[in-house]
Amino acid sequence: MNSQQFREAAHAAVDEIINYYETLPSRRVQSAVEPGYLAPLLPAGPPEDGEPWPSIQRDIESKIMPGLTHWQSPNFMAWFPANATYPSMLAELYSAAFTAPAFNWLCSPAVTELETVVLDWLAKILALPECYLSTGEGGGVIQGSASEAVVTVAVAARERFVKRKFGEMAEGNEKDELVGRLRAKMVGLASDQAHSCSQKAMNIAGTKFRSIPTRKENEFAMTGGDLRQAIEQCKRDGLEPYYLTVSLGATPTCAVDRFEEIAEVAQEYPDIWIHVDAAYAGAALVCEEYQHLTKAFGSFDSFDMNMHKWLLTNFDASCLFIKKRSELTSALSITPSYLRSNQYDAGLVTDYRDWQIPLGRRFRSLKIWFVMRSYGINGFKAHIRRHVKLGEMFANLIRGRGDLFEVVTPPAFALTVFTIKPRKGQKGDEKAAEVTNGFTPDAGDQDVVEANRITKEVYERVNASGEIFLTSGVVAGIYAIRVVSANERTEEKYLQKAFDILVKTAEEVLEKDKP
Ligand code: PLP
C-alpha cells in the first residue's frame, strides 16, 4: 500500500468506523453466531496475490460484524464497561505509525518520558498519596491489564519477603534450601469477592492462595477483623502470609474493603505487601466525593486501575502505581550487555522493561495524554457523575417494583445488583438448586433456591432477546443480575428500556410458573 492508497483507505475506514458508532444503538448487542461460524466464510488460506483495500474492507461488515458483541453499544450493560473514545483511537493510530517496542528510554525517549509525566498527572487526579509519584521513591507504569499488574507486584512481594528473611545470608546450598522451604509455605490473600486474577497471580508466582470470607451484613467488604483472623489462621497452619489484595470495587457487587481498618491491622504485619485492585471503580477517584477512600493508601504498597474500563481510554491502559519502585525493579531487573545504555548506567533514566513482565512495550501513554487533554479533569468528573446518577436512577426504578425485584447490595459505582422475587408458594423444577453452580444458599432456604431459579431464567431470556446485554453472578449463594450504567453512550432512555424489558420478562416468567 503506498501513501496515496493509505490516504484513501484510511479515510474510508474512518468513515466506516463513524458510521458504525452512529448505528450502534440499532444493532443486536450480543453476537448470535454459533461456535465455528467464521472458518466456513473464509478461504482455506491467504490469497496468492495481494487484494485491493475495498475488497478487504467489505468483509468487515459481512464476516466480522456478525461475530462481534458491541461493547460500545448503549445497550451493553454487562460485566464492566470498556470505554473507547475518538481521541484515544487517534492515539492508537499514531502509536501504530511510530511503532517501536520501547523497552528502554533510549529506544524512544518520548515514549518513556510521556508515560512518567501522564502517570504522575493521573496519580494526582486520583488523589493518591504523594508516595506514589515518580518525584519521590514511587511511580507509575502502564500494564496491559489489572491481572498483569497483580502478577507483577506478586513477584516483587515474594522477592521482598524472601530478601527480608534471608537477604543477609551468603549464597549457597544452605540458603537455597531455606528459601525453597519458605516459598512452599508462602501464601497470598484476598477476599472472597476479589477478582480471580489474585488467585491466578499466586499460582504464577508459585505460592499458595487463601480466600478471606466476607459477609452480606458488611456489604461484602473485608474488614480489619476478617484480615486479622485470616492471618492468624494461616500462621496456626504453618503458613507465611506475604501478599494481600484489597479491592476498591470488587467485581460481583463493587464492594470496597475497609481500607483504614486494614491499614491498622497491617501495621502488625509489615512484611505483607498490600495491593489495591481498583480495576474498574478506581476511575471514580477523579471525583472529590470518592477521594476519602485513598487516605489509607500510604500504608499500602501498590495500586492499580484500568483507564480502559471507565476512564474513556481504549483497551489497554492499566495504570499501576508503586510506593517504592526499587522493590519492583530489584525483583525484575536483569540487564545483559545488549540492554545497557550510558544513560541507564548513569542512573539518569527509567527503563520500563524493569517494571513489567515483557520486554517490549507499546506507546500507550499517548492515548492517556490525548484523552486527558480532550476531556480535562472536569470532563472526567462529569463522565463519572453522569453514570453514577444514571445508576441511582436505575436502582430506584428497580426498588419501585418491590413486588418483582430485590436489590442485593446498595448500588455502587453505577452498578445495580438485584434478584427476581418469587411469588408466595411458587415452585419450579427440582433442578432449581443447580443454578448456583455449587454455591449453597443457607441450609433449607427454599425461597433463595426458588429466587435463584427464577432470576436465572429471567436473565437468560433477557439476553437471548439481543436487545440489551447483562451479566449475572452468584454472591453468597444468591444468583443475581448485574446492570452497569457506565458505558460512554449510556442515556436515561436506554436504562428505562432495560428496566421495561426486565419487568416484562419477570412478569412472563412469574406468570408461567404461577402456583
Ligand atoms: N480486578 C477487578 C476488580 C475486575 O473487575 C477485573 C475485570 O473485570 C480485573 C481485576 C481483571 O481485569 P483485566 O482484564 O484488566 O486483567
Image: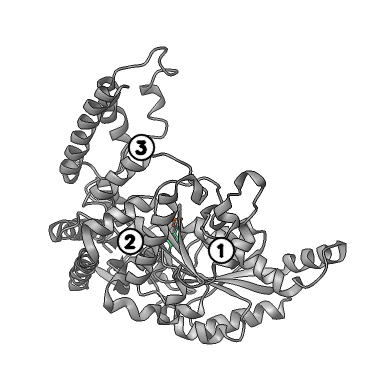
Q: Looking at the picture, how far across and down is residue 164, in whole percent?
A: 70, 74
The residue located at (45%, 52%) in the rendering is: 144
Asked where in the image residue 475 lies, by quadrant, the reply is bottom left
Number of residue marks: 3
In contact (CB < 8 Å): disc 1 and disc 2: no
Q: Is residue 248 visible?
A: yes
Label number found at residue 455: 2
Residue type beneath disc 3: Ala
According to the image, what is the colour scheme of the structure?
Answer: one colour
Q: Residue furthest right?
A: 173
Instruction: Choose mark 1 or mark 3, whichever is in front.
Output: 3
Label 3 element class? helix
Ligand 1 picture quarter: bottom left
Label 3 sits on residue: 97
Relative vertical location of residue 481 with respect to residue 48 in this rendering, above or below: below
Q: Gap between marks 1 and 3, in whole Å? A: 31 Å
Nearest the viewer among 250 and 30 is 250
Farthest-out residue, top: 48
Residue designated by label 1: 153
Residue at the location (38% across, 53% down)? 365
Residue type, numbered disc 1: Val
Image quarter where the N terminus lies is top left
1 vs 2, front mark: 1
Q: Is residue 375 left or right of residue 250?
A: left
Q: Between residues 510 and 168, which one lies in front from this camera angle?
A: 168
What is the C-alpha distance between the residues marked 3 and 2? Answer: 48 Å
